[in-house]
Amino acid sequence: MNQHLSLVSLVVADYDEAIAFFTHALNFELCEDTPLGGGKRWVVVRPRGQLGSGLLLARADGPAQKSRIGDQTGGRVFLFLETDDFERDHARMIAAGVRFVAAPRHEAYSIVAVFEDLCGNRWDLIQSIKRS
């Protein structure tokens, strides 16, 4: 059996605002933006050059979904953005206005810093430490 995780749905307030954040602040690429009728769209972004997992940006529909914007995991880190150059991406993201909630820290397994997306969901920017 061959399986992989293709998309994670992220509830957002506005499609275009979310596309702008992910493509400019995080340097993701817009892979798909298909109108579905009734104001709904199928919007997929993923880290530039990647063929694997992506985010389905899903505009909140109704009060229950709107109440979850920015808090899909009760305040825990929700997603992990792995990089091959922490310093480069951390500096670029700060310059783009991304809000980091703590200074970078060195762990036994990685360099990591927690940031928030445009809705307030928490992410880790992470670079794994190679062990010899």
Image: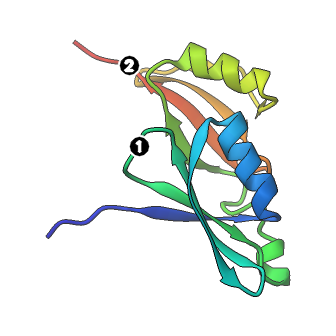
Q: Where is residue 34 in the image (x, y as percent from the top left)?
A: 61, 71
Image depth: mark 1 or mark 2 in front: 1
Residue 1 higher or lower than 83, as above or below:
below
Q: Which label is found at residue 129?
A: 2
Q: Nearer the viewer, residue 75 or 20?
A: 20
Residue type at mark 1? Gln
Residue 72, position in %: x, y? Answer: 69, 63
Q: With respect to residue 79, does 12 lie above or below?
A: below
Left or right of residue 5: residue 56? right
- Residue 113 at x, y = what percent? 63, 27
Q: How is the image coloured?
A: rainbow
| Mark nearer the N terminus (1 vs 2) | 1
Q: Is residue 49 visible?
A: yes
- Image height of 17 relative to 124, above or below: below
Q: Which of the 4 quarters of the picture holds residue 39?
A: bottom right
The residue lying at 58 percent from left, 15 percent from top is 88
Res. 128 mark: none
Q: Quadrant of the N terminus?
A: bottom left
Up-down: is 128 above or below 17?
above
Percent of width and height locating residue 29:
57, 45
- Residue under pointer 1: 50
Task: Mark yes or no: residue 70 visible.
Answer: no
Q: How far apart are marks 1 and 2 (CA)?
A: 21 Å
Which quarter shows the C terminus? top left
- Asked if residue 35 lies left or right of residue 110, the reply is right
Q: Which amino acid does label 2 sit on?
A: Ile
What secondary structure is found at the residue carrying circle 1?
A: loop
> Regarding mark 2 in the picture, which secondary structure is present there?
loop
> At x 68% / y 16%, what residue is drawn?
91
Identify the residue shown where x is 74% and y is 44%: 21
User: Few, some or many C-alpha atoms within 10 Å of disc 2 (few <14, some 14-19, many ≥20)?
Assistant: few
